[in-house]
Amino acid sequence: MTFAHTIGLTRYVFADLRELLAKGTPLRSGDVLAGVAAASAEERVAAQFALADLPLEHFLNETVVPYEDDEVTRLIADTHDAEAFAPIGSLTVGELRNWLLSDDATPERLAALAPGLTPEMVAAVSKLMRVQDLIAAARKIRVVTRFRTTVGLPGRLSTRLQPNHPTDSPLGIAASILDGLMLDSGDAVVGVNLAGDRVETTTRLLHMMDALRRRFAIPMQSCVLAHLTTQMAALAGGAPVDLLFQSIAGTEAANRSFGVNLALLAEAHQAGRALRRGDVCADGRTGANIMYFETGQGSALSANAHHGAGGLAVDQQTLEARAYGVARRFDPMLVNTVVGFIGPEYLYDGKQIVRAGLEDHFCGKLLGLPMGCDVCYTNHAEADQDDMDTLLTLLGVAGVNYIMGVPGADDIMLNYQSTSFHDALYLRRVLDVKPAPEFEAWRSGESFARLMAEARHPERLLTA
């Protein structure tokens, strides 16, 4: 089925849904690189007009990546909730945008709608929205998850404490953890990226962080961001695994490039839940939210795994939304779009990074996910920390669940720029929000006082 719209004397025709979504996407360098971007602003506007008139039901009949070729497409189609979709089933994409911004779209209705939306639907509606639209709609959505802390509550903003070290030094990592804890960081997760993906290092760091948690009664969850199979090997060896991490993407081929598939994710999810390491909730459930996923626009393109129907490329923002379709299958504790990490080949400058971060947050929340954002850029991008301050503040207004806490905002292992412990303090102060309630209570107690007293001696943690 083709789509068309006329502007002036020019009629623009789009061959299929894949092309319509790509040409209707706000400009970004990754789509130019992939050869799918609109050739002009006029063509982009024409595609957006045609997209606005497209009935939402069409997304249930045409896929951008073939069902028979891709397990992500099959997951999205086979788990679609027709009953949840019914209240908006007669709307077009443009009418969905208008409804999302109306007073009728209450938090309760948005939560009930999430299982009825496909990733392609939410990607499509985001392409029609201004920055303020993305903020206003996302702010109405709250997705709350729990392990030892409760993340996503109204009036709260959490952080992932990211204490990376270029040689995976336990002492260096411990020093950064203490620095972050003293500055109110770490209530979403204390998560360490490894310089080298080894089971022994993963196990040692998990034991070190668990000893710190128990010694000072810290309400926190830890994670070592090794490959999922490395974490599962550590788990099998008796390591104290809290959250299980994996990078994911929006096509089967892109996930294969990460060394994972849906079956492996399901196996890890089951193994992590069986440990029951999270606190028991009032209803008796425990450890329900144990997965931590990271995504990023351009990940499929960077793996040459961005192809859809007929082998033609799919735009990077639609594929990013499809990654959220993978994530929600596993009821995660945290989902993090690492928005500017891949580089300017995919998001060229601060303007593109800001737009993409707000799109990702909106799309993930609309699909029912607990969204955080690594507000970041690489040193060769046309961006700086002022751009990150802008995105940080806009995401805070939009109700983001959590952000990163990196010592000095400069990750000395991954070599990119992010947000610091102090940036989180700034955002909490200007928006009058607080850390997770369990973490806030701990900060005013005797255990935190003991931590402060010993903070000058991180080496003691290594023998705790």
Image (cartoon, rainbow, N blue to C red):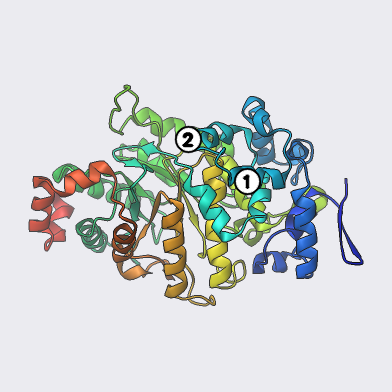
Query: Could you tell me which quadrant the N terminus lies in?
Result: top right
For the residues bearing labels 1 and 2, Cβ distance under 8 angstroms: no
Residues 178 and 385: in front is: 385
Q: How many marks?
A: 2
User: Label 2 crowding class (10 Å Cα cut-off): few <14, some 14-19, many 20+?
Assistant: some
Question: Which quarter of the figure has residue 26?
Answer: bottom right
Secondary structure found at label 2: loop
Relative to 291, does residue 172 appear above or below in the rendering?
A: below
Q: Nearer the viewer, residue 195 or 366?
A: 366
Whole-percent x, y for residue 89 in the image:
71, 33
**In this figure, which residue is indicated by the disc labeled 2?**
331
Percent position of residue 352, x then y: 58, 67
Is residue 38 rendered to the left or right of residue 268? right
Amino acid marked by disc 1: Arg
Q: Is residue 295 visible?
A: no
Taking the spot 29% from the left edge, 45% from the top edge, the residue there is: 436
Image quarter of residue 290: top left
Task: Give the numbered dot on residue 322.
Answer: 1
Which percent across, then down, holds residue 247? 51, 50
Position of 208 with respect to 109 (left or right) is: left
Q: Residue furthest top?
A: 284
The local secondary structure at tag 1 comes to helix
Tell me what residue is drawn at x 73 percent, y 58 percent.
24
Is residue 63 toward the left or the right of residue 455 in the image? right
Q: Name the residue: 70% across, 44% down.
A: 95
- Between 275 and 145, the residue placed more toward the observer is 145
